[in-house]
Image (spheres, rainbow, N blue to C red):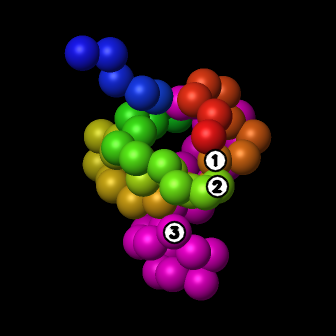
Amino acid sequence: KKSKSLILLKDQILFNSPSKFSKPLAKLLKGRLLLIEKCKYKWCNIKTKDYEGWILNEGNWGLKY
């Protein structure tokens, strides 16, 4: 099974839910590989080694929605 993934081209904040007003969980640094669980609108639910949450899918390399 091919997994959907993307690489951050700039630092981003990982949020608890798909809104800039939700609780920030972590700052993800440029160059980090993220596995995509699902996307809706401009937000993607991602998984990485230590974290799981939502990021804006803008300015990233890989899957576009």
Q: Crowding at label 2, few (<14), some or many (≥20) Cα neighbours within 10 Å?
A: few
Above/below status of 15 relative to 44: below
| Residue occupied by mark 3 | 18
Would you say the residues marked 2 and 1 are in contact, meaning their CB atoms lie under 8 Å apart? yes
- Picture coordinates of residue 20, whole percent (x, y): 62, 75
- Asked whether the viewer can see residue 27, the reply is no
Which kind of residue does numbered mark 3 sit on?
Pro
Q: Is 3 colored magenta in this rendering? A: no
Q: Residue furthest top?
A: 1
Q: Residue furthest left?
A: 1
Which mark is on residue 42? 2
Q: Earlier in the sequence, mark 3 or mark 2?
A: 3
Location of residue 36 (image quadrant): top left
| Residue occupied by mark 1 | 57
Q: Earlier in the sequence, mark 2 or mark 1?
A: 2
Which kind of residue does numbered mark 2 sit on?
Lys
Q: Earlier in the sequence, mark 3 or mark 1?
A: 3
- Picture coordinates of residue 65, whole percent (x, y): 62, 40
- Asked whether the viewer can see residue 19, the reply is yes
Look at the image and give the residue range highlighted in magenta.
6-31
- Picture coordinates of residue 53, whole percent (x, y): 39, 59
Above/below status of 14 relative to 21: above
- Marks 3 and 1, how far apart at CA: 11 Å
